[in-house]
Image: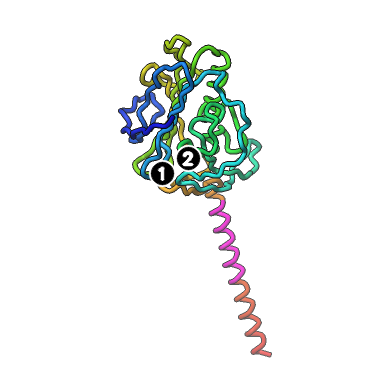
Amino acid sequence: MVATSTIYPALGVAADSYQKDKLSGAEQHPLSFKNEKQLVLADQDSQKRAVDAHIQLNYAEEPTAKQATKLNYDPVGWHNYKFKYKKANASIGKSWLFNRGHLIGYQFSGLNDEAKNLVPETAYLNTGALKKSNASNKKAMLYYERGLTKWLKHHKSSRLDYQVTPMYSGNELLPRQIRLSYIGYSNSGEKVKISLKSYREEDGNDGATVVYLNNDSSNSIINYADGTAKNTLHKKADLAAQKEAAEEASSAAASSSARASSEAVSSAKA
């Protein structure tokens, strides 16, 4: 089931909200209750950006097939970089900055290489860590996906309504935030509030819980207009090292020139 979604301007941002001002995205509302699985993907907009993904399902309707490991579709604005990052022990490692991020995770939708469900997301937003994953990080999608999976498992007679919306600034290709919206339905269609015990949870429309997550990474500066990025780790140290090396090279050149001049004078006297 596929439908077109409209981009709406963001409403006023509350002082205690994690929603960034002046971003826009599809309107947030739960789907009407149906006693069947619903999957609604918005058509890409004129810039080929993914706009909105929405699902309603129960535990028995989760996909059981194993997810393919490879993705072939590159969402608009896709670039990737292997950037330096500082490990917990203060040593330096390298990791990929971006993931091809699913809006609705495979564990709910069964979709893998679907263009309407993919945007460039930082690895940190997607998995909660610069490398590997951290499922306890409430700034990352993984925390909420794990929480909603557990909710379905413990409420097998209920349905989960889950909407994921990329939030854009103007015509930028990369979303600056991802908005998650979730609510439960009892088997009789009554709404059930869901809380995953996150400090980032807010009250959304129609009783839903809403979370805003930033599409950023501590070791980079991202150009959201085109998806390019720069590694910021040790920038000052690198510049200082470059300056020191330049000064040493200049000093060495001066010494070499002085020696050559001295040798020339000695040769003339001889």
Disc 2 versus disc 1: distance between alpha carbons?
9 Å
Residue in view at x 57 percent, y 18 percent: 60
Read off the residue under disc 2: 115
Residue in view at x 49 percent, y 48 percent: 229
Quarter placement of the C terminus: bottom right
Residue in view at x 43 percent, y 20 percent: 209
Q: How many marks?
A: 2
Residue 237 horizontal/vertical position (percent): 56, 50
Horizontally, is 164 left or right of 257 in the view?
Answer: left
Q: Residue 21's image quarter?
A: top left
Query: Looking at the picture, which amino acid does disc 2 mark?
Result: Ala
Q: Residue 52's image quarter?
A: top left
Is residue 135 inside the magenta stretch?
no
Residue 262, visible in the rendered structure: yes
Is residue 250 inside the magenta stretch?
yes
Furthest-right residue in view?
270
Query: Do the residues under discs 2 and 1 have CB atoms within 8 angstroms?
Result: yes
Q: Eyeballing the image, is 224 above or below 111?
A: below
Relative to the observer, which residue lies in front, 117 or 99? 117
Furthest-top residue in view?
188
Q: Which residues are magenta?
A: 238-253
Q: Considering the numbered disc 2 on the image, is that residue within a helix, a strand or a loop?
A: helix
User: What colour scheme does the image use?
Assistant: rainbow
Residue in view at x 37 percent, y 23 percent: 29
Relative to the observer, which residue lies in front, 201 or 219? 201
Q: Main secondary structure of the magenta part?
A: helix
Residue 182 horizontal/vertical position (percent): 45, 21
Query: Looking at the picture, which amino acid does disc 1 mark?
Result: Lys
Residue 180, visible in the rendered structure: no
Residue 48: numbered disc: 1
Relative to the observer, which residue lies in front, 58 or 170? 58
Horizontally, is 68 left or right of 121 in the view?
Answer: right
